[in-house]
Amino acid sequence: MNRLNFRTLDLNLLRVFDEVMAERNLTRAAHNLALSQPAVSNALRRLRELLGDDLVRRSGYGVEPTPLALQIWPAVREALQRLRESLAPGPFDPTQAQDAFVLAMADATASKIVPGLVAILDREAPGVTLRVLPLTTRDPRPLLEDGGVDLAIGYFPGVLAELGATHLQEQAPRFLSRRLYEGHYVVVMRRGHPLAQGPLTLDDYCAARHLLVSFSGRPFGFVDEALAALSRRRRIVLTVNQFFTAGQVVATSDLLTVLPHHFLSSTGRAAELAVQPLPIDVPTVHVDMLWHRQTELGSAQRWLRETVVRAVAGAPSPDEAC
């Protein structure tokens, strides 16, 4: 954007641009802004003329951003957020708030955190709404970058390693994190499975047929990495993307799976399931909360993060949950 364009720019155009980028849909953006769809389209046209770029193009039932739109949106969103904080200072009041937050997490994580979140909202923030999206990746940074998600919660070892390297290089990271809890994983099978009685040996484990929970669909998980280090492998015959589905399948088959221990009660079939320790050592699975740096200073976002921490602290321990 050159000096002339910036001097003549109507800042309301940036608000429209930000909402369209967040929703990827002109009708929803217009509703959120309390504008008509023609008004949103007109604002986009004016901004296109100023920037010399289409910004968004029709795609299916919504719009798809251009490379320039993706490039400038993070800076626009961060600037608008800082402006909102400057013009509306003061602490976030959950009792009066009507905010809506979007969280991304797996179903096993949600079973541990969401009940506590709902209880806190009922008591302290009745006007606040939450939307939980399924987490389908070990790298949720694109979800946080485009502003569609406020918090991602899960196991992100690769992302945290990169963030740690950024800190060592004395660079300001674009994403921040906080450790929530450690996940304890166990081997799960139907109660009458031949391997349900007695110690589960590594040979028996590798010889069995397995179900893998994989968010990406890739048939290789952290257990397989540990097996590969021992020059061993297991046979994965089914891959699903939900822990709940895995619990249902192994309860009625001879497949083995690996589930977070605290999640067994959430399957609704805990009485039909047998549990064995993993016959190999695996790295501790840390569950972390990840967010974009541009939301770090917002009082509403700070309240959301602290509320998640409180919900985790009040959740049952794995032993209590099972």
Image: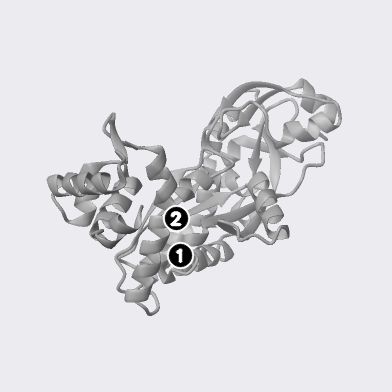
Q: Which residue sits at x=60%, y=22%?
A: 238
Between 286 and 267, the residue placed more toward the observer is 286
Mark closer to the chain start, 1 or 2: 2
Residue drawn at point x = 31 percent, y = 40 percent: 53
Taking the image as drawn, is residue 252 in sight?
no
Q: Position of residue 278 (x, y in %)?
A: 77, 38
Q: For residue 315, what is the image quadrant?
A: bottom right
- Labels 1 and 2 touching (C-beta < 8 A): yes
Q: Amino acid at mark 1?
A: Leu
Secondary-structure class at tag 1: helix
Q: Residue 304's mark? A: 1
Which residue is more in the foreground, 184 or 151? Answer: 151
Neighbour tally class for label 2: few under 14, some 14-19, many 20 plus, Cα within 10 Å: many
Left-right relation of 243 to 232: left
Question: Mark 2 sits on what residue?
Answer: 150
Please, what secondary structure does the residue beneath circle 2 have? loop
